[in-house]
Image: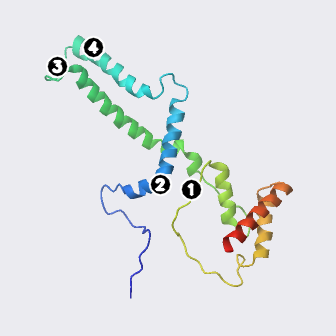
Amino acid sequence: MKKEKWLFEISSETKLIDLNLKEVWQYRDLLMLFVKRDLITLYKQTILGPLWYLVQPLFTSVIFTLVFNNVAGIQTGGIPPFLFNLAGITTWNYFKECLTATSDTFKKNEQIFGKVYFPKIRKRQDYGLWLKILKIQKYAFGLPIVLAHYRDRSNSKSNNKLEMVRWNWNLYKNVENLSFITSIYLMIVWAYRGFKKYS
């Protein structure tokens, strides 16, 4: 019997350091979106912008050189004092920023990790949940993998398309509290995409 090969396999980590660069490359657009968002929010109202990352350690190194090496007379063992201080400050600032950014991840992104509850309806809870998530978060990304398989029964609600129309209308009109015109428009879009998908 031939062993089935999966596209993705979820397993526990086996290595101490597992970078998984293939997955980072696969989701590079999401990574770039987060980096761009952080850079824009960090430097939006500064005069120097990203140059501040270069200017700050240089000025700090100059002050350290004046205070510790010239005034206090601390020796650096033959290494130029300015470069010695610059190397130490750069390393410390990198460590500090990484630690702070990592520990603040959940606090800064609480709208992403917050609790989102399923709507209280009998059917279409998954669709209602996605609508709630999209109201909270600006972007959503789908995974190109199958997370679950299910069997389609002949008497299931999703198999009965007329019943699905009723449940979708209930979701748009009563749960999401959309106007009559908006609900009609969304029903037409939903029906069009359904016909396009199965034709």
**Mark 4 residue element:** helix
- Name the amino acid type tagged 3: Gln
- Kindly report which numbered mark, 3 or 2, lies closer to the viewer in this rendering: 2
Q: Is residue 159 left or right of residue 15?
A: right
**Mark 2 residue element:** loop
| Cβ–Cβ under 8 Å for marks 1 and 2 | yes
**Mark 1 residue element:** loop
Disc 1 or 4, which lies upstream in sequence? 4
Q: Residues within 10 Å of mark 4 (few under 14, many from 20)?
A: some
* Residue pointed to by mark 3: 75
Query: Residue 69 appears in which quarter of the rendering?
Result: top left
Q: Residues within 10 Å of mark 2 (few under 14, many from 20)?
A: few
Disc 3 or 2, which lies upstream in sequence? 2
Query: Furthest-bottom residue in view?
Result: 1
Q: Is residue 155 left or right of residue 106?
A: right
- Kindly report which numbered mark, 1 or 4, lies closer to the viewer in this rendering: 1
Measure the C-alpha gap from mark 2 to mark 4: 46 Å
- Name the amino acid type tagged 2: Tyr
Q: Is residue 176 above or below residue 92?
A: below
| Cβ–Cβ under 8 Å for marks 3 and 2 | no
* Residue pointed to by mark 4: 66
Q: Is residue 6 above or below residue 182?
A: below
- Name the amino acid type tagged 4: Leu
Q: Residues within 10 Å of mark 1 (few under 14, many from 20)?
A: few
| Cβ–Cβ under 8 Å for marks 1 and 4 | no
* Residue pointed to by mark 1: 141
